[in-house]
Image: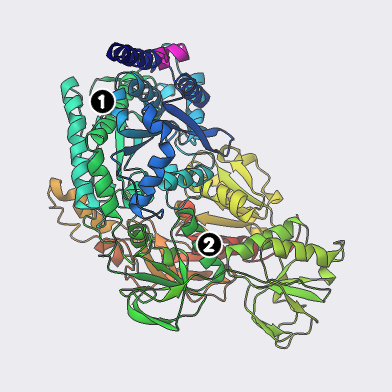
Amino acid sequence: MRKLLVILLIACFNTTLVSGQNIKSPSEFLGYDIGTQFSRHHQIIDYFQNVATALPNQVKLEQYGSTYERRPLYLAYISSEGNMQNLETIRKNNLKNTGLLDGTPDQTNTAIVWLSYNVHGNEASSSEAAMLTLYKLLTERKGLLENTVVIIDPGINPDGRDRYVNWFNETASQPYDIDQQASEHHEPWPGGRPNHYLFDLNRDWVWASQIETQARIKVYNKWMPHIHVDFHEQGINEPYYFAPAAEPFHEIITDWQRDFQTQIGKNHSKYFDAEGWLFFTRERFDLFYPSYGDTYPTYMGAIGMTYEQGGHGMAGLGILNNEGHVLTLVERLTHHTTTGISTVEIASKNAKELNNQFAKFFDNSNLKYKSYVLKGNADNLNSLKALLKTHEIQFENASGNKVSGFNYATGQQGSMSINDETLVIHSDQPKGKMVKVLFEPNAKLSDSLTYDITAWSLPYAYGLDAIASINKISSSKQFERKDLGVVYDAYGYVSKWNSMDDAQFLAELLKNNIKVRFTEKPFRSNGSNFERGSLIITKGDNKHITDFTTTINKIAQKHLRFLTTITSGFSQTTPDIGSPDIKLVNKQKVAILSGEGTSSLSYGAIWHFFEQQLHYPLTSINTNDLSRTNLSKYNVLILPSGYYGSVLGESNMSKLKDWVRNGGKVIAIDGALRSFAGKDGFSLSYKSPSVSNDSDNLTAYADREREYTNQLITGAIFKSNVDHTHPMAFGYDDTYFTLKIGSSGYSLLNSGYNVAYITDTKVYSGFAGKDALANLNQTLVFGEERMGSGSVIYMADNPLFRSFWENGKLFLVNSIFFVNNNAYEL
């Protein structure tokens, strides 16, 4: 009997050994040595599918979504056979450990490690490393899988990766050219870094504006891993960066999270030192802005980390860097494979402690603010609720009639009346620390030298009145129901105007050739009051629409818009419906400049806004074609942020001015304002900064970088004054909280309209240097300048930045449809 048992054990061992040896290496499967060519996304997925087929008891492949260009998004789950048989139990136990799932967890010492590759498409070594990491885990290091579940996302951004890889493959010399000046080391606009809509997916984790992020967040929250690594690349002259991260750390990050990052870094250094590979830690890459692939997991309890290999889109298959070293793709992917395996190794060694500390993270009893209370625009509240649902953050409705605490509008202690429609988010829920990060008025900043913006507080971003309370506010869950009713045949109908939902409603009406009016003055009709910007749809304007009332009802129901019936064009208070102050909305033909000279991020945000949010046609014109473009075909031309020196030369600028004088409308955003400031024919001008101690120039070399922060605004929130009688500001109050992402200042217009401007230089959230603040008073946020029959609209602050500043988007819509409205069809 004992002899038979030994034989069976040997057989089982041999079967496991053979199964591991039978899987093909990436090089064997691809038909070329890994790292000697760039693999397309489908080849990488094909390899993962091949391994999953060969080892179905150890590898599970799951499609979790698709990109805008229809490429599949996959996750691979890798572990021992025993763990794979209990995969769902391991997942549920982990969620029970956090309190996200009811029930008592079984004792588990299984670590969950999530490895994410290629979020930036042209940082292309990481997806190659994903294949080699998978292979090594299942062959050389399979012992690590006995107490570890490894989740691999081999390609977060397939659209960007294939854009880069396809370009390189059709451009590169054979053999590759290591000369930095060779064309294969210089990507054309927009490059492979972003996704289809040119968004940086590594800044979208919280905002979830892109479908890739939305799909990933859904499955991430099903697992809530203990460790998450985001693999990146940096410049060709940098070696390798890994944890621990640099300051600033957000204050909710625990001492244990900090310490374990150091343990991981020391484990990596053991392998790098043995090979003589250079690396650095604790510099540049901080843990503050919440929407990264390292910070989002960190604020969800994980050890979230960024690993950065030198290379990026410039490196190609090989490049001679400034230190005389030929940096190859083989080297780059080898480094990423090493840190990936090392991460799994230390997770396996510390699996029990990872589970224990992960559970402790979700104790939120020591958070200062117990409840965040918000009220205001119902559509903006609903948009915020949708974001909270994406991240599975709980919310309720308030009970009572008043709440006191920190008042966001004033930046100090105060109170606010509330009702049963007021939103309440408590911090004593499992994701309470993320609630604090997203809702706290002003995140504590330990170091002003930070990698990204320093303010994002959601009450400001969504334009809501809010109180942060140190006491838990009474609340209850309420069934949300909205009875819109049905409108019947009447003289006309009026719909409110103060949100993106209203803008989407208008866009669909126009696309259905329904004529819509808007009012420039408040009026009263049929017992109801209507504010500036209210949409008016009359039967008389739409005799061309068959079954008009049915069509209006259908569109209104689709967009959840409540229509108020009016029975006559004779208003109770003027203007009457036929007044010149109630104008027809033109079905605008909108164009945008794209290509060299424009910021791909800014262009992409506008492109995404039109196609995925406003749902309104947009024509893209390449900057190289501007000189031969017939602008008379368009009513509006949008200039994204960018550097237009080579685009708007004397000839093109003259052409643009003539078009504006004839009724065209230019909307210049952020950096595009540089093309008009101080130029002949425009009243826009820079406000010159006054830099302290500039004449002395005695700041030590070592202190220069920190001293320079005095001139910076790193994404801070300010209150601006708003002329809400101007069409650009219809739907807004007399103040607007703006997110400034740079220190450039423009003086108030001496002709035209200063629609939004700053006179209060108080920083409501985020960091701003003292010199930058001194230059901020009396500066323009949004303005309009008339030129002949047309207008130039200046948006000094970008309301579409990363698509999360929800309350600013209507300024752009107003600029397109309401400002200097010329109601004629082209």
Give the residue drawn at x 34%, y 14%.
8
Residue 728 locus on image (x, y percent): 57, 67
Q: Mark 2: few, some, or many residues within 10 Å (few <14, many ≥20)?
A: some
Residue 492 locus on image (x, y percent): 78, 74
Q: Secondary structure at mark 1?
A: loop
Q: Quadrant location of the C terminus?
A: bottom right
Give the residue drawn at x 38%, y 54%.
103
Residue 765 lies, with reference to residue 532, above or below; the image says above
Q: Mark 1: few, some, or many residues within 10 Å (few <14, many ≥20)?
A: few
Q: Secondary structure at mark 2?
A: helix
> Where does label 1 land, which residue?
322
Which one is in front in this view, the residue at disc 1 or the one at disc 2? 2
Marks counted in the figure total: 2
Relative to 437, is 379 on the left or the right?
right
> Label 1 vs label 2: CA separation?
49 Å
Q: What segment carries the magenta color?
A: 22-33
Q: Nearer the viewer, residue 360 or 494?
A: 360
Residue 483 locus on image (x, y percent): 67, 72
**As shown in the figure, which amino acid type bears the numbered disc 1?**
Asn
Q: Is residue 223 visible?
A: yes
Q: Quadrant location of the N terminus?
A: top left
**As shown in the figure, which amino acid type bears the numbered disc 2?**
Ser
> Where does label 2 land, which residue?
383
Q: Sequence-wise, which precedes: disc 1 or disc 2? A: 1
Relative to 54, is 301 on the left or the right?
left
Residue 247 locus on image (x, y percent): 22, 49
In the rendered image, which quarter is residue 267 located in? top left
Q: Nearer the viewer, residue 733 or 460?
A: 460
- Please tell me whether residue 622 belongs to the stretch shown in magenta: no
Q: Nearer the viewer, residue 3 or 212?
A: 3
Circle on res. 811: none
